Image (cartoon, rainbow, N blue to C red):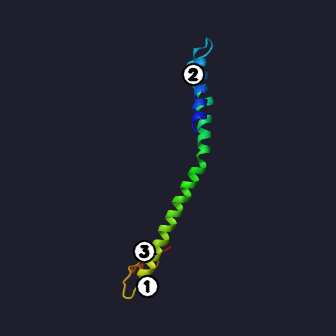
Amino acid sequence: MYIVPIAWLYVALMMAVAEATSSQGTLLGAFFTFVLYGLMPIGLVLYFMGTPARRRQRLAREAEEAQAYVETQATGAAVQESPGSAQANTGDLASGDLVAPVRKEP
């Protein structure tokens, strides 16, 4: 799978070497030749080729999280249905401050 990117990088490296050793070439030109003809295109190709794998990993992770959530809700419902269980306030009720906030008169 990686033979084509490796071959492309080799060709880009040889282009950069030819640029650097040319009588009219420079090291800066060789660097930009290698980056613009070698690293950037291969980076984009490998990124796009890896998109399906990243999507599969994301969907698998979301499915695991959903399954864990369903299992948590199922165990939570079983605890709520058991008689005599005392539940703390889980955030679905107001906090019930007894002291009103102080405001300035207009």
Label 1 and label 3: CA atoms lie apart by 42 Å
Q: Residue at x 59, y 30 (%)?
A: 7
Label 1: few (<14), some (14–19) or many (≥20) C-alpha neighbours in 10 Å? few
- In the image, 72 versus 106, the foreground residue is 72
Among the two numbered marks 2 and 3 on one chain, the one whose residue lies closer to the N terminus: 2
Residue type of the residue flagged with mark 2: Leu
Q: Which mark is residue 102?
A: 3
Res 33 → quadrant: top right
Q: Let me know if residue 35 appears in the view.
A: no
Label 2: few (<14), some (14–19) or many (≥20) C-alpha neighbours in 10 Å? few
User: Residue at label 2?
Assistant: 28
Res 20 → quadrant: top right
Q: Are marks 2 and 3 in contact (CB under 8 Å)?
A: no
- In the image, 42 versus 94, the foreground residue is 42
Residue type of the residue flagged with mark 3: Val
Q: Provide residue 90's location: percent of width, then percent of height.
A: 42, 76
Give the mark count.
3
User: Residue at label 1?
Assistant: 81
Residue positioned most to the bottom: 83
